Image: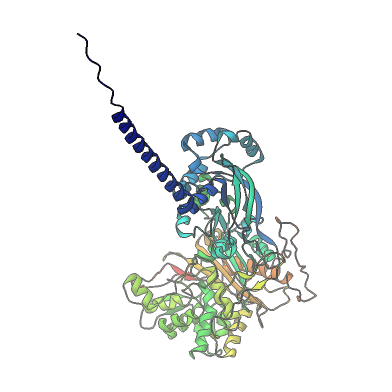
């Protein structure tokens, strides 16, 4: 049986097609509307955003680090320079596998563990799009090998930069300091904007203290790059502003002479112009090569320096603290006059032993049997302990502390370097805070000869001496005396006005003390006699020997060897010249010196000779000739003066610790002696 075919309904089909067509057209219209809206959003509403993204893919800003300011001595001798160099940098966001890249790169350019450690530290603190230094100061061979393999290391490139160099090396290490690679700690304290593209920062010394002035302001350039990130052309350049050049007050000739005079002995020397506080020399021996630190010192080199028994990294001029010994006696003598406790003609009987009245606490003098009756000038000339024991006791520790603080003892000098030690000026309050106990009269007399709790830095003593030499007018010590925007611009002096009025009220008091200090050097009976011979100006000076003896040591024993004494003594000598109107004050400190006059005195004299050679108005009959700088590696100063060792044959004798019934907390293992046997 055949099925009947259904009759086709053309009208219904046509209506269905019409509905479907309308639906499809509506969808197309909606899609077109959506597309138009999207295009409008991209091209109108978010045009600036996407245009910037596009531009950033094509244009890349590159920071231009500023040239670091140069450092010169007062005469224009270059002390810190910038030399061209190349380093290897990595952009982290362009590296997919950093570990693999470093392993492969190490096969082309040797990478030390120090390089990798420094790189990983910076990597943690840097943005992924910023270049991170991997290896500094590439050799020509390393640059060539990398150029051949450049295609293998996307995100790695060789970048030129200016590397810091110190032509005179160890001579100025403790003054100038050094720069070092910026580490994670530096990133936390530095302004990221100001250090864009900069890899080094001042670490110690002038480099650290004047970082803001030396660093400058970074610039940038806009470059067009291809898909691989390689530069095609430079579109814009905004140059960096170089840091200011700095001129130190130090004279390299005097600095070199001081270093040579120390001759490898452990100690330091400081010279200051008392008329303005300018530091003319500041030497700490032994020293180190600051160039080792510029691109990251190796662990081996740093360990060698850090563990050396003579501590070459210690700036003894600023941070070495030692008992000053008899060098404080002129200051105490001046205090006795200024406070009305003494007159220059007042005399004291020295019998060889001084006891605190009403006690059995006694101290010996510098000569067996004493010096007899002495006045102020003789007491300074002979360094008579008894005179200063009694004066300190009459003054009392409170007035003593107040007077000595006027010369800057017990506090930072204010020198324009970081890291200065304060030393200790003994006082009732200091001991109560430190030891929770009271002050004893025996400690006062010991303080009178610069012993006991007393400690000073060579810079502190030089600062105090410059105040004394400058007729009591205090100036904060200054290393930087002028700045300069560039080598063709004029120097801009940095003012250093007095930090206060003169501490001396009566000029006659000053003259009496200076008379005694002149006798130290020029009188045949003086502890430093001979040190002024052949010098065209009158020298005033004072020796100091901080001794460490056990209670049972017989320091009067003339058979004691100089080597043994040197191992137990801290030798000082302070001097200034011309004595009438001083223009230079010098302090020399030796950690192992037999006697202040014979060990440290000749060193101070050689520094004066070097200074004299730099003076255009030096007397014409002096045999010394001005030195010159013939090369960046050799500083020639004044020729060595004739040997003129201190002689004190007329004042034999020695002092020891002869105390009895020492009060609690009184440091009984020190004494002071300026008249060696």
* Quadrant location, the C terminus: bottom right
Q: Is residue 89 above or below residue 97?
A: below
- Seen as rendered, the residue at the extreme right is 620
Residue at the spot x=67%, y=55% of the render?
167
Residue at the spot x=38%, y=73% of the render?
660
Q: Is residue 15 above or below residue 40?
A: above
Quadrant hosting residue 612: bottom right
Which is more toward the observer, 93 or 624? 93
Residue 290, given in percent of the width and then of the height, sits at: 59, 54
Answer whether residue 289 is visible to the viewer in this image. no
Residue 407, given in percent of the width and then of the height, sits at: 52, 79
Which is more toward the observer, 109 or 356? 109
Residue 628, given in percent of the width and then of the height, sits at: 75, 63
Snapshot colouring = rainbow
Residue 102, given in percent of the width and then of the height, sits at: 51, 37
Answer whether residue 556 is visible to the viewer in this image. yes
Q: Is residue 396 left or right of residue 244?
A: left
- Seen as rendered, the residue at the extreme left is 1
Q: Is residue 516 left or right of residue 410?
A: right
Which is more toward the observer, 107 or 451? 107
Q: Is residue 82 above or below residue 92?
A: below
Q: Is residue 482 left or right of residue 663?
A: right
Which is more toward the observer, 36 or 532? 36
């Amino acid at each position: 049986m055949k099925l009947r075919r259904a009759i086709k309904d053309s009208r219904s089909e046509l209506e269905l097609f019409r509905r479907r067509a309308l639906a499809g057209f509506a969808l197309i219209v909606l899609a077109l509307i959506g597309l138009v809206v999207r295009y409008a959003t991209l091209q109108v509403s978010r045009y600036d955003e996407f245009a910037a993204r596009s531009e950033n893919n094509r244009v890349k800003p590159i920071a231009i680090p500023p040239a670091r300011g140069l450092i010169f001595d007062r005469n224009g001798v270059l002390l810190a320079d910038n030399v061209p160099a190349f380093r290897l940098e990595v952009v982290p966001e362009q590296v997919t596998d950093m570990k693999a890249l470093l392993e492969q790169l190490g096969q082309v350019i040797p990478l030390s563990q120090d390089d990798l450690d420094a790189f990983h530290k910076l990597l943690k603190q840097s943005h992924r799009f910023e270049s991170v230094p991997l290896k500094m100061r590439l050799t020509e061979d390393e640059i060539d090998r990398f150029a051949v393999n450049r295609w293998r290391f996307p995100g790695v490139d060789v970048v030129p930069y200016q590397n810091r160099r110190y032509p005179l090396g160890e001579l100025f290490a403790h003054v100038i300091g050094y720069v070092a690679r910026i580490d994670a700690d530096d990133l936390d304290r530095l302004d990221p904007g100001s250090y864009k593209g900069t890899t080094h920062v001042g670490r110690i010394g002038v480099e650290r203290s004047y970082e803001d002035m030396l660093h400058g302001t970074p610039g940038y350039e806009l470059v067009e790059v291809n898909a691989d990130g390689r530069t095609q052309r430079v579109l814009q350049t905004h140059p960096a502003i170089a840091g200011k050049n700095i001129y130190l007050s130090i004279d390299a000739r005097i600095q070199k002479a001081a270093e040579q005079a120390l001759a490898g002995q452990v100690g330091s020397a400081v010279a200051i112009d008392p008329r303005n506080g300018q530091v003319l020399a500041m030497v700490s021996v032994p020293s180190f090569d600051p160039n080792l630190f510029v691109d990251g010192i190796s662990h081996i080199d740093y360990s060698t320096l850090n563990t050396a028994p003579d501590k070459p990294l210690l700036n003894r001029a600023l941070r070495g603290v030692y008992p000053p010994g008899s060098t404080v006696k002129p200051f105490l003598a001046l205090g006795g006059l200024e406070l009305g406790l003494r007159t220059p003609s007042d005399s004291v009987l020295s019998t060889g032993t001084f006891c605190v009245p009403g006690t059995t606490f006694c101290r010996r003098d510098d000569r067996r049997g004493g010096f007899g009756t002495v006045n102020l000038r003789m007491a300074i000339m002979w360094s008579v302990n008894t005179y200063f024991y009694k004066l300190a006791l009459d003054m009392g520790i409170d007035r003593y502390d107040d007077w000595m603080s006027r010369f800057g003892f017990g506090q930072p000098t204010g020198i324009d370097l970081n890291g200065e030690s304060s030393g200790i000026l003994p006082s009732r309050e200091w001991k109560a805070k430190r030891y929770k106990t009271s002050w004893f009269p025996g400690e006062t007399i010991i303080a009178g000869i610069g012993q006991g709790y007393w400690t000073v830095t060579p810079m502190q003593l030089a600062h105090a001496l410059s105040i004394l030499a400058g007729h009591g007018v205090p100036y904060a010590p200054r290393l930087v005396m002028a700045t300069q925007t560039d080598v063709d611009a004029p120097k801009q002096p940095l003012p250093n006005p007095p930090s206060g009025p003169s501490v001396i009220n009566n000029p006659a008091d000053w003259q009496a003390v200076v008379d005694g200090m002149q006798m130290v050097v020029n009188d045949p009976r003086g502890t430093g006699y001979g040190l002024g011979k052949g010098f065209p100006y009158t020298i005033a000076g004072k020796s100091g020997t901080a001794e460490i003896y056990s209670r049972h040591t017989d320091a009067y024993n003339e058979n004691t060897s100089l080597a043994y004494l040197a191992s137990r003594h801290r030798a000082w000598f302070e001097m200034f010249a011309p004595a009438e109107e001083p223009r230079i004050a010098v302090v020399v400190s030796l950690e192992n010196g037999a006697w202040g006059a014979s060990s440290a005195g000749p060193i101070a004299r050689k520094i004066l000779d070097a200074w004299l050679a730099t003076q255009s108005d030096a007397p014409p009959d002096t045999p010394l000739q001005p030195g010159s700088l013939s090369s960046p590696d050799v500083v020639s100063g004044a020729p060595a003066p004739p040997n003129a060792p201190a002689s004190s044959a007329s004042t034999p004798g020695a002092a020891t610790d002869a105390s009895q019934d020492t009060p609690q907390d009184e440091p009984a293992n020190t004494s002071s002696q300026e008249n060696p046997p």
